[in-house]
Image: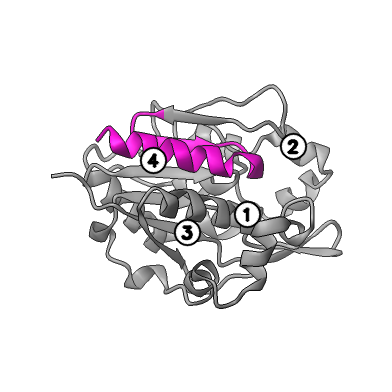
Amino acid sequence: MSPPRRAIITVTSAHAPLFEGTHTTGAFVSEVLHPYKALTAAGFQVDITSEKGTYTPDWLSLTPDFLSGEDRAIWDDTSSPFRKALDNRPKASTIDGNLYGVFFASAGHAALIDYPTAYDLKKIAATVWENGGIVSSVCHGPAVFHDLIDPTTGEPLIKGKTITGFTTEAETVMNIQDELKSWKTPLVEETAEAMGAKYTRSKGVWDDFHVVDGRLVTGQNPASATSTAKAVVEAFEKL
């Protein structure tokens, strides 16, 4: 039997100052909204959750470079289906992973803080994977793969697989490497190495780029959120 045509998008519950305290990172809105739009357009029921049931929007994700036009209108309309799903998201501990055929980890830099120890999010992902569904992420979303175990093998879920995600080079370009190091959590490339995965990326740090490795689908950055979600749909249709 095919997995349910239902997707769960995760958002980070964490928030933190960045750029020497001038801005606050949290959930990157377009990395939630674009997969939501792509998956609902493909006929999926889409729910949203976070580890603690809370979220803070990332400051950068609300700027015109990342949120404008139709996307801005959807965000500003607190009665839109997207905002209702996001603003009323339940805690991950209340979610039954058996209801979903797709797990999609959105991000924002703050995901580096809570995703590595977000055990209820990991439980959902592991259940979706064990049931033959799609596990996916974008940008800093692979932070959730830290110590995420494949229930069928007892090994890290991404071990031996190829993934992408936000590049260490991009962190340097943004000049926030030292601040991120102070969080004492692994960057995406470090998580891939620690979990035995092969990390790959596009030549440009801001290119739209994603990787499909069977039922594992990952995207590199905010620009990749839509293409990654569409690749998730294609992978799901092949199940």
Q: CA distance from mark 2 to mark 4?
A: 28 Å
Q: CA distance from mark 3 to mark 4?
A: 17 Å
**Which of labels 1 and 2 is toward the front?**
1
Q: CA distance from mark 3 to mark 1?
A: 13 Å
Q: CA distance from mark 2 to mark 3?
A: 23 Å
Magenta stretch: residue 218 in it?
A: yes
> Eyeballing the image, is 30 above or below 204?
below
Q: Secondary structure at mark 1?
A: helix
Question: Which numbered dot is residue 30?
Answer: 1
Question: Which numbered dot is residue 233?
Answer: 4
Q: Amino acid at mark 2?
A: Ala
Q: What residue is rendered at 52% in x and 66% in y?
A: 82
The image shows a total of numbered marks equal to 4
**Which of labels 2 and 3 is toward the front?**
3
Res. 57 in view:
no
Magenta stretch: residue 232 in it?
A: yes
**Which of labels 3 and 1 is toward the front?**
1
The reply to whether dot 3 and dot 4 touch (C-beta < 8 Å) is no
Q: CA distance from mark 1 to mark 2?
A: 18 Å
Q: Secondary structure at mark 3?
A: strand
Give the residue number, with chain letter if any, for mark 3: 10
